[in-house]
Image: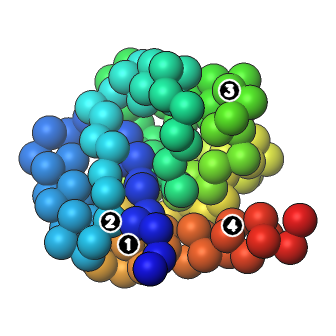
Amino acid sequence: MDKKHTIMVVEDEHLLLEAITKKLTLTGIEVIPCASGTEAIAYLDSHSEVPDAIWLDYYLKDMNGLDFLRLLKKNTKAANTPVLVVSNSASESNVHNMLALGASQYILKSEYRLDEIITMLLDLVSKKNEKDSHR
């Protein structure tokens, strides 16, 4: 039987975090909900298990996506976790900087439905699993 996928969701809009968590859970995914970047980094630093992917809201109250990725890169266990950055706006420099720091994908929330974003996340997880199995 396949191992359940685990996705960390970093989103500071409480209702959105709840909706995403519920939708992922209904899809059979284990969710680590985090209401701030600080909470997410603290979780990653204190747990040996690393999520299969991270859903990252670019604009958090405590830090932006660039700050989060810089902190993530310092965590040797989680540094290569695929990150899907979800934002309300996408300046070319933000997108470029996020991808340069290792984000797997950068999308605009308004252009996709929740289930489409979940499909993208699962694609990232399966690509990562393929890569890992070829090592």
Task: Work out whether mark 4 precedes mark 3 in sequence or the reverse, and give the earlier one.
Answer: 3
In the rendered image, residue 110, in percent from the top left (x then y), is placed at 32, 67
Q: Does residue 86 sit above or below 14 in this rendering?
A: below
Labelled pair 2, 1 in contact (Cβ < 8 Å): yes
Whichever of labels 2 and 3 marks the residue nearer the N terminus, that label is 2
Reading the chain from its start, which is encountered first: label 3 or label 1? Answer: 3
Residue 105 on image: x %, y %: 61, 62
Amino acid carrying label 3: it is Asn
Report the residue that reaches farthest toward the left.
Answer: 15
Residue at 41% x, 47% y is 8
Mark closer to the chain start, 2 or 4: 2
Q: Please tell me how crowded label 2 is: few (under 14), some (14-19), or many (20+) other residues with Cα within 10 Å.
A: some
Q: Amino acid at mark 1?
A: Ile
Please tell me whether residue 38 is drawn above or below residue 2 in the rendered image. Answer: above
- Mark on residue 126? none
For residue 40, which quarter of the picture?
top left
Identify the amino acid type marked 2.
Ile
Secondary element under disc 3, as helix, strand or loop, is loop
Query: Which of pointers 4 and 1 indicates the residue nearer the eye?
Result: 4
Nearer to the camera, 106 or 70: 70
Q: How many marks?
A: 4
Q: CA distance from mark 2 to mark 4?
A: 16 Å
Task: Give the residue number, with chain letter if any, for mark 3.
Answer: 75
| Mark positioned earlier in the residue sequence (4 or 1) | 1
- Left or right of 99, for residue 20: left
**Residue assigned mark 4:** 128
Q: Amino acid type of disc 4?
A: Lys
Q: Nearer the viewer, mark 2 or mark 1?
A: 2
Secondary structure beneath disc 4?
Answer: helix
